[in-house]
Amino acid sequence: MYRPQIKVIDCTVRDGGLMNKWQFEDQFVRNVYHALSEAGVDYMEIGYLSSESAFSRDEYGPWRFCAEEDLQRIIGDTEKKIKLSAMADIGRIEYDDIPPKSESSLDMVRVACYVHQIDKAIALAHHCIEKGYETTINLMAVSTVGLRDLNEALEDLNKSKVPIIYLVDSFGAFYSEHIDTLGAKYFERMPDKTIGIYCHNNQQLAFANTISAIINGVNFLDATLYGIGRGAGNCPLELLLSFLKNPKFKVRPIIKCIEEDIFPWAKKIDWGYSVPYMVTGVLNQHPRAAMAHMESDHQEKVTGFFDSVTTE
Amino acid sequence: MYRPQIKVIDCTVRDGGLMNKWQFEDQFVRNVYHALSEAGVDYMEIGYLSSESAFSRDEYGPWRFCAEEDLQRIIGDTEKKIKLSAMADIGRIEYDDIPPKSESSLDMVRVACYVHQIDKAIALAHHCIEKGYETTINLMAVSTVGLRDLNEALEDLNKSKVPIIYLVDSFGAFYSEHIDTLGAKYFERMPDKTIGIYCHNNQQLAFANTISAIINGVNFLDATLYGIGRGAGNCPLELLLSFLKNPKFKVRPIIKCIEEDIFPWAKKIDWGYSVPYMVTGVLNQHPRAAMAHMESDHQEKVTGFFDSVTTE
């Protein structure tokens, strides 16, 4: 029996764009948008909400900004059957650059933050609520947060007006037992919040840990087409939809979109399981050293990489 | 705290050989043997035990047979620090062709069977026990076995002298909840047996389900280097050793062996997650249709594959 409260958020364009500076053709984004709509996915996270002053349009594609005119080119004249979300990073978006909801096709703004930014994140999320948006706060890299700081952050989030709080395994370091323990703590400290999960796939556990989160009562689930994303990538959407029992979800449009739109990208950019990403996941480290290694001309020299990150 | 009863069995040569008819150079097998020994892995499953009359040596490499002279070329004059295992399929090995343990470097024979072969499997395993070997029975494709047949098979196995019984997810169809339910049933019906787990990676769950099995008390764990194996492959050994806490396990020799010996094979043969294998996993089907598709000249046409296996 399915749980109707479960919502699926696809982050293909937002997280996949970390690999190509959001240089996706409009047609690609449009195809993903229509495939997700047809598949019954609840939200499409289409990019980051950034001020034009924070990044150059010469270097970054439109989904670094998610301006209304960009969104309109994707939606076109079709009936909008999927909610649109954008992620906001602390310090890269000015309050005044966020349009009121009435002037935007975005439905949700998700504020990503590290634990030391929690007050700024709550303030930004409250601002977005006042402007009419659904909001979440995505507390990143929680695998590196000590107990005292975590308790305080969760207390602050619990007191906030933000209704949805994410547990984010930024480094792909968690096993299912971590999800059990942290899930229990999130629900204990924030009994009235909806909890979300975002997993990276460094240890081939993104899908499995998402299942563990579901079992623990987590209802907002993030995934991407074929797991596309930075480094080891994310929970594959096609696996997640196949697992979920809600009859509104259809996997065929996702498979078709993977064939037609994701496979061509798989020839141009690398993501997915590999030894360096696995090593940083096991060590609970940011994947930046692994990403640098994978972009080098000696990416197969994985023993040297292992030595470089394990030797003091 | 680690569980000293846990044993790890590497199946790189045995299961990887399904992809190349065991045409591995001796040096490859020797390198794997030494890497596993150095890493503290408990068993190396080096191939299948088959009668020479069952297969042609012109077509199949030595690890289809595991003759003593073949084993000797791998072990050489070095001290044997790892146990050797071979798998036996019903009907492909004559009793008389199994040497007594005193004349063999093999320590363990694992009998693989489907549920309708359980009596033959027990008889073969008992014969191997009499000849002095450790034995297991690996009950394959348990995801397709109905409750009545499963209960009877587990009762029969419980009455047998075989000390170790495997739960095998041949089709990569299981979620962690299946492992919980079946694990509980295996322990309930066979309270004095040691239980093992073998998972395929069709849904990126081989490692996760192995962890679920560990949590459920399963102590014999199968894996392969970098997940090498037929179709979607297996639980990656480097992930499993990194998870296990027994200080005797070392992951560096495994990473080095992946770099030097597995990466060259990855250029020659395909294994790992792909849409067709995911689809047969979700449908709880044998991967043969997916394997045929992946060997065709239209392997990227995954929507057509999806339609072909989901349309009546």
Image: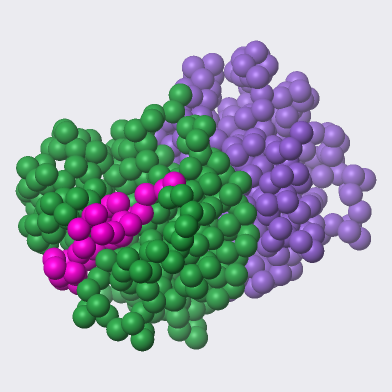
Chain colours: A purple, B green
Q: Is residue B203 visible?
A: no
Give the x, y percent position of residue B17: 41, 70
Residue at position x 83%, y 39% from top?
A: A93
Above or below for B302 versus A125 = below
Residue at position x 60%, y 70% from top?
A: B264
Decide if residue B195 is on the left or right side of residue A233.
left
Give the x, y percent position of residue B106: 31, 56
Q: Is residue B238 visible?
A: yes
Quarter location, residue A72:
bottom right
Closest to the observer, B202 or A152? B202
In the image, is residue B174 part of the stretch drawn in magenta? no
Closest to the observer, B30 or A290? B30
Give the x, y percent position of residue B251: 57, 44
Closest to the observer, A302 or B63? B63
Residue at the limit of the structure toward the front, as seen here: B77
Decide if residue B116 is on the left or right side of residue B63.
left
Quadrant (top left, top right, bottom left, bottom right) of the C terminus of chain B: bottom left
Above or below for A227 versus A177 = below
Total marks placed: 0
Quarter location, residue B210:
top left
Give the x, y percent position of residue B283: 31, 62
The magenta segment is B81-109
Above or below for A200 versus B94 = above
Residue at position x 19%, y 38% from top?
A: B193
Residue at position x 40%, y 64% from top?
A: B72
Decide if residue B261 is on the left or right side of residue A94.
left
Closest to the observer, A7 or B139? B139
In the image, is residue B83 part of the stretch drawn in magenta? yes
